[in-house]
């Protein structure tokens, strides 16, 4: 490799082609957006627990829009909308997948860099621009988008329907269009890299499960994100150019609008064709990371490697044919409801396989309780807790009465929100030495983990019951219904846990940013892992390996293999004569 | 400026936390045997508290839940719900136990070598086939219940009611003596004709336009939903009923009310729940609450989404007929 061209500050830290630098850029931007998203949730949790009370915190941050510190209904809806958008797309899609796909794909398959460094850079900077636009949209006159993160028209299409559907919505759509382009460029790059740039001996069946997860995630993204882009484009047409794709027969503010023949249900189909796979775009990378970390820290091979790949493939395939379970009561043909119930409940099978395989991996292991391992075990627990209630929501007959209630909020926050965030933290703690050449403090890691897990369950477990009591989501306050008066105490408990959980994240931020500069210098292979990234030098070099790229001779999970002194055998160690590959 | 102050506080806390790390041994960054031991035990303890928490919620919050279904169709809903919930809880309790117990039991100890156990087709087959069989049962019952509630093709003499949504209130229209709703479109909205009923349609004149929903006990009601502006969702939790109201199309849902409002007020579960609510209201000095069926909006529809409701009264059929006959028909209303 002749990569020793002169690097300036700009090419090294800003417009870098190097996947390791781009991965760090994704992570830091994701963390920044995460701070905004989580902070918003704390503000609106205050309103839910103590409705229409005055809070200095609210006045301080929402300024003249919330004179006296009492949150307005429009601001409440704006906060839940932007919280959802930021957490799902900016933190858990770009921040999670963008960070770890970029870091690990070249390092774990044995490649010098991504297939196209330029596209990789472009992917980050488009994500950066879309983040900036999303943040700017918070400051426009009539408020940011407030129609829910699912932006169903006509609410999102008509500025007459709510303030946030004016300029705020326009910026939301522009931001998301750029985000989707960024995501597509990134995903195509990941797919090409995994298929073409694997080192000698790195058969597909020797790939670590992280790579399998990122690879399949990228494919799902390429299949489904363009559909959201088209949905957004048609919405822009309806909003700005008078077309009627989604709108028909509307009378608003004393006036009949000209729209005729469109259907909002069309938008719902297009949206959820991305929206559901998006759940797995968020979740699969976290599960991949977990597979890797649980195997390493259990000092055991991941149980059922091929079954794990099979279940990733099955989940990916099924994820594209279940979107209708978000629409059981949308007014679509009930027969479709039956079909989507069937396909949806099938997903429980590969999910169960994954959960049991994790548990079997723990069984008779020698668990090394590094912070990353704690987060991974936490993920398995929340994934099971949240996943099980999917049996209620995926069943069309049962969905009728819990649809759009807090039961749904509890379900998806546990199964994709908390699980994916725990997976992301696990990844950060585990690969921090690879990113920054230093280690994070483990004691703070433990504090962070226990605080986060306790807060997560404290927030989302009681929330199921509020939903089962029939409380709809996105209610500014439930004081308008005496029926829900007995839920007030539960909401206070939930908010207390939420604020606690938010504050605990400061521990992580402190640990993260100080460890970048002051952490203990890392060894080459601190977790005694088998995969290729730990054969690269601690100080980053462009091209990853100073010399030849190592050759791979075995799968990634030879931990505690009989016949070896050490409890791990790196992928580069040749098989002994007569030794069978697992 | 105050925002800046809060941010400064956060930074100060962060610095403090970092300073604390000097108390911990900064050099220890990889889990030691002591850590393995302590964290493993913590997982065990957390597991115990987790079980206590779950059981506490299940017992304590049980009284918050909705009372038994007030519609005939909802009985299957409640059955299916019970079966699914029991299944979920059994699996949850077993699987979480395994996670926390294994984490505790196999916490790392010195040089103990982990078991090299990479595959077992038998085990994998077990946890593929078991969920598959269980799911088959759930899917079959679920689909049957779904068709039971959604299929209204063979209903004899149903009551047809149109429920009409707009920002931020509900209206309703009964089909009248002919059992046929007159045509309607938002383009006909004018003055008192707020639902846009087409008065040139001969079915329209005997329609009855109301702002409070009355339903007869024991007769199947077919709801036709419309919306004039954005998507709303007609949610009637006590009847296990929900359907979106979508501008530009008519959606439908049907159920048979099983208890009158009076009977529901005398229901034991309702009494417990209402007592709980009134205890809280008394502390706050608010008027006591009396149970009523409600229709609430359950799809984000704008700033007053949280207060878009309509009272539902279920009564004996004779009372219902009397009530309807007292309401003005469309032709009486508009002339």
Image (tube, coloured by chain):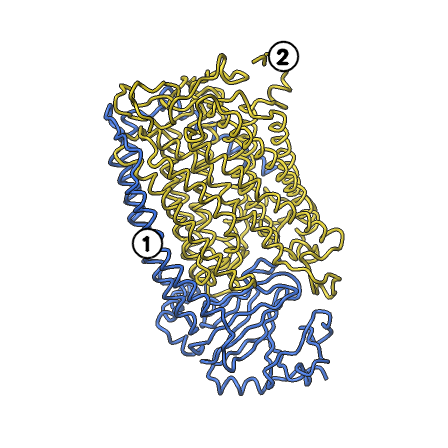
Chain colours: A yellow, B blue
Query: Can residue A485 be seen here?
Result: no
Q: Residue at x 55, y 76 (%)?
A: B213
Do the residues at discs 2 and 1 belong to one chain?
A: no
Query: Can residue A546 be seen here?
Result: yes
Q: Residue at x 66, y 65 (%)?
A: B248
Q: Find residue A142 and report its horizontal and vertical position in percent.
A: 69, 49
Q: Find residue B115 and report its horizontal and vertical position in percent.
A: 25, 30
- Residue annotated with mark 2: A6
Residue at the front extreme, as displayed: A578
- Residue annotated with mark 1: B89
CA gap, disc 2 and disc 1: 61 Å
Q: Residue at x 53, y 75 (%)?
A: B222
Mark 2 and 1 residues: CB-CB less than 8 Å, in contact?
Answer: no
Dot 2 lies on which element?
loop
**Nearer to the camera, B107 or A314:** A314
Image quadrant occupied by the C terminus of chain B: bottom right
Q: Find residue B49 and report its horizontal and vertical position in percent.
A: 30, 45
Image quadrant occupied by the N terminus of chain B: top right
The chain holding disc 1 is: B
Q: In which quadrant of the rendered view does residue A563 lie? A: top left
Q: Find residue A138 and report its horizontal and vertical position in percent.
A: 64, 43
**Nearer to the camera, A554 or A440:** A554
The crowd level at tag 1 (other Cα within 10 Å; few <14, some 14-19, many 20+) is some
The tally of labels here is 2
Q: In which quadrant of the rendered view does residue A173 lie? A: top right
Q: In which quadrant of the rendered view does residue B74 lie? A: bottom left
The chain holding disc 2 is: A
Numbered circle sitting on residue A42: none
């Amino acid at each position: 490799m002749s990569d020793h061209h002169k690097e300036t500050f700009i090419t090294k830290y800003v417009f870098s082609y190097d996947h390791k630098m781009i991965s760090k850029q994704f992570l830091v931007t994701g963390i920044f957006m995460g701070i905004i998203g989580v902070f918003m949730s704390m503000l609106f949790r205050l309103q839910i627990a103590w409705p229409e009370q005055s809070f200095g915190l609210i006045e301080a941050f929402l300024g003249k829009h919330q004179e006296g510190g009492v949150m307005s209904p429009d601001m409440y809806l704006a906060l839940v909308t932007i919280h959802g958008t930021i957490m799902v797309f900016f933190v858990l899609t770009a921040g999670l997948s963008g960070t770890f796909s970029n870091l690990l794909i070249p390092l774990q398959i044995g490649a010098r860099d991504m297939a196209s460094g330029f596209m990789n850079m472009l992917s980050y900077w488009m994500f950066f621009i879309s983040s900036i636009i999303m943040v700017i949209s918070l400051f426009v006159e009539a408020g940011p988008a407030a129609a829910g993160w699912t932006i169903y028209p006509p609410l999102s299409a008509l500025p007459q329907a709510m303030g946030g559907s004016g300029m705020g919505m326009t910026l939301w759509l522009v931001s998301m269009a750029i985000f989707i382009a960024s995501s597509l460029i990134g995903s195509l790059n990941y797919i090409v890299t995994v298929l073409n740039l694997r080192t000698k001996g790195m058969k597909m069946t020797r790939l670590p499960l992280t790579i399998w997860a990122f690879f399949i995630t990228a494919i799902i993204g390429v299949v489904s994100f363009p559909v959201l882009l088209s949905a957004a484009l048609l919405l822009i047409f309806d909003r700005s150019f008078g077309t009627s794709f989604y709108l028909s027969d509307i009378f608003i503010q004393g006036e009949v609008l000209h729209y005729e023949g469109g259907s909002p249900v069309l938008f719902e189909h297009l949206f959820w064709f991305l929206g559901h796979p998006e759940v797995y775009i968020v979740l699969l990378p976290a599960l991949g990371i977990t597979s890797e970390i649980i195997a390493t820290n259990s000092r055991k091979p991941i149980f059922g490697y091929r079954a794990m790949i099979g279940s990733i493939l099955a989940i990916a395939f099924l994820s594209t044919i279940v979107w209708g379970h978000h629409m059981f009561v949308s007014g679509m043909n009930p027969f479709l409801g039956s079909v989507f119930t069937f396909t949806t409940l099938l997903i429980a099978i590969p999910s169960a396989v994954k959960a049991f395989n994790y548990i079997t991996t723990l069984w008779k292991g020698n668990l090394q309780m590094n912070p990353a391992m704690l987060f991974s075990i936490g993920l398995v627990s929340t994934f099971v807790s949240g996943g099980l209630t999917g049996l209620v929501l995926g069943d069309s007959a049962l969905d009728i009465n819990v649809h759009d209630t807090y039961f749904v909020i509890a379900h998806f926050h546990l199964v994709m929100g908390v699980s994916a965030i725990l997976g992301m933290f696990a990844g950060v703690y585990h690969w921090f030495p690879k990113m920054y050449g230093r280690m994070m403090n483990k004691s703070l890691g433990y504090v962070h983990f226990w605080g986060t897990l306790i807060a997560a369950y404290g927030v989302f477990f009681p929330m199921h019951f509020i939903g089962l009591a029939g409380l709809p989501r996105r209610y500014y306050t439930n004081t308008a219904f005496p029926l829900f008066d007995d839920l007030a105490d539960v909401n206070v408990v939930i908010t207390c846990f939420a604020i606690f959980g938010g504050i605990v994240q400061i521990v992580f931020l402190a640990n993260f940013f100080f460890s970048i500069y002051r952490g203990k210098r890392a060894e080459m292979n601190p977790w005694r892992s088998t995969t290729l990234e730990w054969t690269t030098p601690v100080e980053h070099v462009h091209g990853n390996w100073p010399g030849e790229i190592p050759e791979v001779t075995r799968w990634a999970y030879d931990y505690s293999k009989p016949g070896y002194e050490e409890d791990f055998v790196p992928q580069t160690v040749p098989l002994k004569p007569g030794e069978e590959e697992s | 400026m105050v925002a800046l102050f809060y941010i400064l506080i956060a930074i100060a806390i962060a610095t403090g936390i970092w300073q604390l790390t000097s108390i911990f041994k900064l050099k220890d960054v990889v889990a030691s045997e002591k850590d393995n031991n302590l964290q493993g035990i913590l997982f065990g303890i957390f597991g115990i508290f987790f079980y206590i928490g779950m059981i506490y919620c299940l017992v304590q919050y049980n009284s918050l839940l909705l009372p038994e279904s007030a519609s005939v169709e909802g009985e299957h809903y409640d059955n299916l719900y019970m079966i699914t919930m029991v299944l979920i809880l059994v699996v949850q309790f077993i699987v979480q136990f395994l996670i926390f117990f294994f984490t505790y039991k196999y916490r790392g100890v010195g040089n103990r070598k982990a078991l090299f156990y990479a595959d077992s087709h038998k085990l994998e087959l077990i946890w593929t086939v078991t969920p598959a069989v269980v799911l088959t049962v759930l899917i079959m019952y679920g689909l049957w219940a779904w068709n039971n509630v959604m299929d209204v093709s063979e209903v004899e003499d149903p009551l047809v009611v149109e429920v009409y949504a707009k920002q931020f209130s509900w209206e309703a229209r009964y089909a009248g003596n002919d059992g046929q709703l007159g045509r309607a479109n938002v383009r006909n909205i004018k003055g008192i004709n707020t639902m846009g009923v087409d008065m040139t349609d001969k079915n329209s004149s005997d329609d009855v336009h109301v702002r409070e929903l009355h339903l007869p006990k024991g007769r199947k009601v077919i709801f036709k939903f419309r919306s004039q502006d954005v998507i709303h969702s007609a949610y009637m939790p006590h009847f296990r009923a929900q359907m979106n109201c979508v501008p530009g199309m008519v959606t439908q849902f049907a159920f048979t009310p099983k208890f009158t409002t009076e009977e529901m007020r005398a229901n034991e579960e309702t009494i417990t729940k209402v007592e709980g609510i009134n205890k809280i209201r008394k502390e706050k000095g608010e008027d006591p609450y009396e149970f009523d069926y409600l229709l609430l909006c359950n799809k984000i529809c704008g700033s007053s989404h949280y207060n878009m409701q309509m009272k539902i009264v279920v009564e004996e059929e004779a009372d219902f007929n009397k009530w309807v006959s007292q309401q003005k028909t469309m032709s009486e209303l508009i002339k």
